[in-house]
Image (cartoon, rainbow, N blue to C red):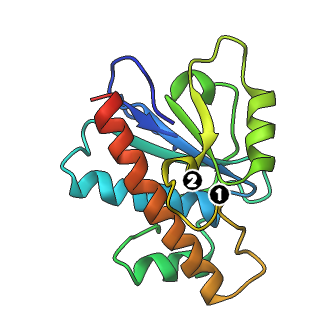
Amino acid sequence: MLKSAMPPPLVFIHSDSSERPNPWKCTGNICRSPTAEGVFRDRVRQAGLAGRIGTDSAGTHSYHVGEAPDPRSQRAAKARGVDLSDLRARKVTAADFADFDYILAMDGGHLAQLRRMAPPDSRATVALFLDYAPDAPKREVPDPYYGEGLHFTEVLDLCEAGAMGLLEAIRRDRL
């Protein structure tokens, strides 16, 4: 999630720092959203904006709160130089809609659920993550949980496309 006012923009991913992150949302917060968080965090770091843009992720359900990302997600990300090992699953809270500028859903079901959860006075942009990747072959990031290696690679490909588009949008509109 990203915030529109100072402190700097954030993408939904929770942060305890003064930076305001952008949260990504998926069901259990162990596959898609931590992959999106890790990839985006890496792109922000590469762009020299780590002190200006924060990230966090959360799930719409509490199935895996406190757990590390799925080992298959971690392996796929690590193969591309992205470390997810420090991330832990958490559930979306009402405070996220005040704390983040962007709350980005992995699929339409999560998007509808997040929009229902959003308080009327929320200024957070609630959208699909892949809205920021118009050339991506899909509009939603598929859940790889019941799949194997190629499913996690596809998620990583989509997250890389979304992360680049989101970073461009933040640079253009917020920085």
Q: Residues within 10 Å of mark 1 (few under 14, many from 20)?
A: some
Task: Tell me where residue 31 appears, x and y as whole percent.
Answer: 63, 67
The front one of 146 and 175 is 175
Amino acid residing under circle 1: Arg
Query: Which residue is found at the position 55% from the left and 42% from the top?
Result: 23
Q: On the image, numbered disc 2 is attached to which residue? A: 130
For the question of whether residue 16 can be seen, the reply is: no
> Which residue ends up furthest to the bottom in the rendered image?
149
Residue 46 against residue 75 in the figure, above or below: above
Task: Tell me where residue 149 appears, x and y as whole percent.
Answer: 61, 88
Task: Tell me where residue 172 appears, x and y as whole percent.
Answer: 30, 34
Q: Mark 1–mark 2 contact, CB under 8 Å?
A: yes
Query: Which residue is found at the position 75% from the left and 31% from the top?
Result: 115
The answer to which quarter of the image holds residue 69 is bottom right
Residue 98 against residue 71 in the figure, above or below: above
Question: Whole-Å distance between the Cαs marked 1 and 2?
Answer: 6 Å
The answer to which quarter of the image holds residue 144 is bottom right
The front one of 67 and 42 is 42
Q: Quadrant of the C terminus?
A: top left
> Which residue ends up furthest to the top in the rendered image?
121
Task: Tell me where residue 81 appears, x and y as whole percent.
Answer: 34, 76
Q: Residues within 10 Å of mark 2 (few under 14, many from 20)?
A: many
Secondary element at image label 2: helix
Query: Which residue is found at the position 80% from the left and 38% from the top?
Result: 113
Q: On the image, numbered disc 1 is attached to which residue? A: 139
For the question of whether residue 59 can be seen, the reply is: yes
The answer to which quarter of the image holds residue 66 is bottom right
Secondary element at image label 1: loop
Query: Which residue is found at the position 33% from the left and 45% from the top?
Result: 168
Label placed on residue 62: none
